[in-house]
Amino acid sequence: MKKTILLYGLLGGVLIAALKMVEYRYLVLEHSLEMYGGIVAALFSVMGIWLGRKLTRTREKLVVREVAVRVEVPVEVRVPVPASGPFVRNEERVRELLLTPRELEILEALAAGLSNKEMADQLFVSENTVKTHAARVFAKLGARRRTQAVQLAKEAGIIA
Amino acid sequence: MKKTILLYGLLGGVLIAALKMVEYRYLVLEHSLEMYGGIVAALFSVMGIWLGRKLTRTREKLVVREVAVRVEVPVEVRVPVPASGPFVRNEERVRELLLTPRELEILEALAAGLSNKEMADQLFVSENTVKTHAARVFAKLGARRRTQAVQLAKEAGIIA
DNA sequence: AGGAGAATCACCCGTTCGGGTGACGCGGAG
DNA sequence: CTCCGCGTCACCCGAACGGGTGATTCTCCT
């Protein structure tokens, strides 16, 4: 968590520095006040939105369920691997199983074959946290091993 | 809630203070412009954060939109999950990877989420044997973990 | 104001895995 | 006949995993 704060602080500093630089150039070039203000406003607006989003990690966006429409597959193409539509998460199952957004992330990383440590690095949390999430996922899926969890999740249509 | 307000207030104060400090360096230039920029920056920063928070606060808004999608035939397809066409093993890949029949069995059991012990019981061999086979599979697939092996095998079209 | 849920992190303990090495028997190719 | 690939098994060791418990912080809901 301290890492996060540090990162944001640093980023903010860089942003302000950049702002100052831009400001100086515009001053020298005697551009219009409005333009300067606009740039500053836009820049900080974007930064603010980004910051707000990051700080309040809100998952759970709008879900677009894509209903696959079968298209006949040419025989010769069918040989290598059967075609399948884009993966559609079974939101029903997810809700049934009470899986939280974070747990879903863990589950996906799990299916990708990552170790706890790799997940921790990737998701920017400690390994202990990953283990906790993973344990909950196992409990909710009724799995004893990660491979089993992946298998069960796939069967339930929770992951691709 | 008090904390939040306090935090924002503090943050704004710090921001303004920092801006003011930097401002002194450009004393020779227009003061009003500096102040203007700082105020705008702080204002939009706060507004951005607030906006970001409000906009991304779509927790319960889970809008499920159903969209008909035409399923094209991918040239190089990922392994499907929901019940689709019958799985066709990519024998080509199997031969490339020099996987023996026994190793394939192990790989399948692996993907089914079985532990080494369970595989041993099921295949009627000792756990050590399973481990040996598994180790060879890992080596041939270039995997370090069983979950990774499963993932790689699926991508290669070796298993369903 | 208080409680529930989510996410974060820590520590312990026992089990499982993965990697390395060595060994043995069998069957087919040379 | 001999070599080699395959399948079988064993042992060791360090790393990773799974299970349990407890704690803190923050947000949301009531």
Image (spheres, coloured by chain):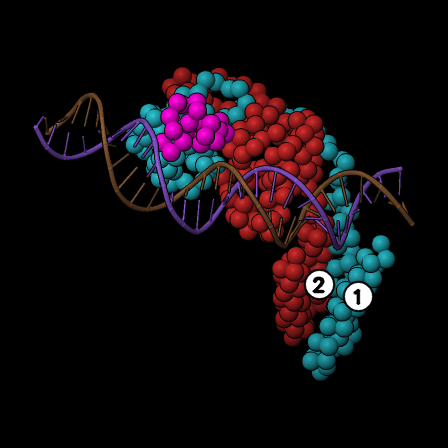
Chain colours: A red, B cyan, C brown, D purple
**Quadrant of residue B86 in the image?**
top left
Residue B125 horizontal/vertical position (percent): 37, 26
Label 2 neighbour load within 10 Å: few <14, some 14-19, many 20+: many
Quadrant of the snapshot with the N terminus of chain A: bottom right
Q: Please give the chain letter of the residue carrying mark 1.
A: B
Give the dominant element type of the magenta stretch: helix, strand or loop.
helix
Residue positioned 54% across, 45% down in the render:
A116
Is A143 displayed left or right of B130 in the figure? right
Q: Which residue is under mark 2?
A: A40
Label 1, label 2: how far apart the Cα atoms are: 21 Å
Please check the rendered image and state whether residue B102 is part of the magenta-colored stretch, yes or no: no
Name which residue type carries label 1: Leu
Looking at this view, is C27 or C5 the one in front?
C27
Residue stretch rendered in magenta on the structure: B107-129
Residue B112 colored magenta? yes
Residue at the location (68% across, 73% down)? A27
Q: Nearer the viewer, mark 1 or mark 2?
A: 1
Q: Which mark is residue A111?
A: none
Q: Is residue A156 visible?
A: yes
Camera-side residue of A46 and A95: A95
Label total for image: 2
Residue carrying label 1:
B10
Query: Residues at badges 1 and 2 in contact (C-beta under 8 Å)?
Result: no
The chain letter for the residue carrying disc 2 is A
**Residue type, numbered disc 2:** Val
Disc 1 secondary structure class: helix
Circle 1 residues within 10 Å: few <14, some 14–19, many ≥20: few
